[in-house]
Amino acid sequence: MSTTKRCYYETLEVERSADDSTLKSAFRKLAMKWHPDRNPGDNTAEVRFKEINEAYEVLKDGDKRAAYDRYGHAAFEQGGFGGGGGPGFGAGFATSFSDIFEDLFGMAGQRGRGTGRERGADLRYNMEISLEDAFKGKTAQIEIPVSVTCESCSGSGAKAGTKPKTCSTCGGAGRVRQAQGFFTLERTCPSCQGRGQTIEDPCPSCTGSGRVTKERSLSVNIPQGVEDGTRIRLAGEGEAGVRGGPPGDLYIFLSVASHAIFQRDGADLHCRVPISMVTAALGGEFEVPTIDRGKSKVKVPSGTQTGRRFRIAGKGMPVLRSRQVGDMYVQVAVETPQNLTKKQQELLAEFEKTIVRCNPNPRRWVSSRK
């Protein structure tokens, strides 16, 4: 192996058994570290960067790597493998450099010709609705301040009768190139900020932005079954784009207000209803309100205790974008009478003497203590 060049595996700081993924990861890491743009004026960094690219160009190619493993650097000397001059920095280098270009500068997909048109920003609107609204759905009207296309200049940003001009610095590309050493960098044009156009005589109504702020009235359709946190997207109802660009979107974020009677659990509703001691003891029925503004009867058997739940099928919330409907669960709470008359107290005291063996909980509590 030639003594004038460093081992390619050592250059990339990997083992000879390294797979393609390991090679690529090592290359990216070292290339970002030694890139001349990150080490301005450092000749050592430039040389190191060249060595890293040369090593990767050989080892990433299966045939070249096999030749290198067998013959070392001699495989590429004196018109050897693939022609003279070794791996070099021609088309192969361009391929390697493009692998890390996005990592270094985040410029992928930004090399097209500038148009000056930019998409408008997305907007968020928070809306609180009642549980009844979530149950049946509704159409709501909202007023929002939003940037809209300037009518005076039709969104161009230029004063009426004039037009934006092609940027003289970048020629309308929106980007400029700058040579640094042996490679060229492409950056956003400082004169037009990447738009490719400049406005010499801006529109007085929008000061050149192509947009003005106005109050807009919008109709929002809220479907049945929406839950707290549901997001509704209104496409194209966000801010207008810059200089005629496409508008953004408006996102309505819904919050469902707490209810005086019902607690929601997905598609099911829960409520707690007080019943009299007599109804609980003897059995009977009572009415409960439902979310659809109706009423349902609940039958309770004799001996009903506090906390017992009764299910009313199909009286819960609709499931969003579905024909399914949840259930309603009624939990009873047995009320203790208050403000009894003397006669009532006497009757209860007399009654107490006859029901010692009828109370379920004391028997269980006593037995558990034995």
Image (cartoon, helix red, strand yellow):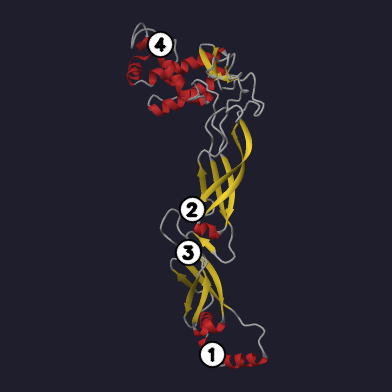
- Compare residues 297 and 61 and report the one nearer the observer: 297
Q: CA distance from mark 2 to mark 3?
A: 16 Å
> What residue is disc 1 on?
355
Foreground mark, 3 or 1, reads: 3
Q: The residue under label 3 is which amino acid type?
A: Gly
State which quarter of the image contains the N terminus.
top left
Foreground mark, 1 or 4, reads: 1
Residue drawn at the location 48% of the way across and 75% of the way down: 297
- Compare residues 280 and 154 and report the one nearer the observer: 154
Q: Are marks 3 and 1 in contact (CB under 8 Å)?
A: no
> What residue is disc 3 on?
316
| 194 relative to 338 in the view: left or right | left
Q: Residue furthest top?
A: 78
The location of residue 216, given as percent across then percent down, is: 60, 42
Number of marks in the image? Answer: 4
Foreground mark, 4 or 2, reads: 2
The location of residue 340, given as percent across then percent down, is: 66, 87
User: Looking at the rendering, which quadrant does residue 336 occupy?
Assistant: bottom right
- Compare residues 13 and 228 and report the one nearer the observer: 228
Q: Are marks 1 and 4 in contact (CB under 8 Å)?
A: no
Q: The residue under label 4 is which amino acid type?
A: Ser
> What residue is disc 2 on?
223
Q: The residue under label 2 is which amino acid type?
A: Pro
> What residue is disc 4 on?
2
Q: CA distance from mark 3 to mark 1?
A: 39 Å
Sequence-earlier tag: 4 or 3: 4
Is residue 366 positioned above or below 97 on the image?
Answer: below
Q: The residue under label 1 is which amino acid type?
A: Ile
Residue drawn at the location 59% of the way across and 16% of the way down: 40
Is residue 281 positioned above or below 92 on the image?
Answer: below
Foreground mark, 1 or 2, reads: 2
Q: CA distance from mark 1 to mark 2?
A: 54 Å
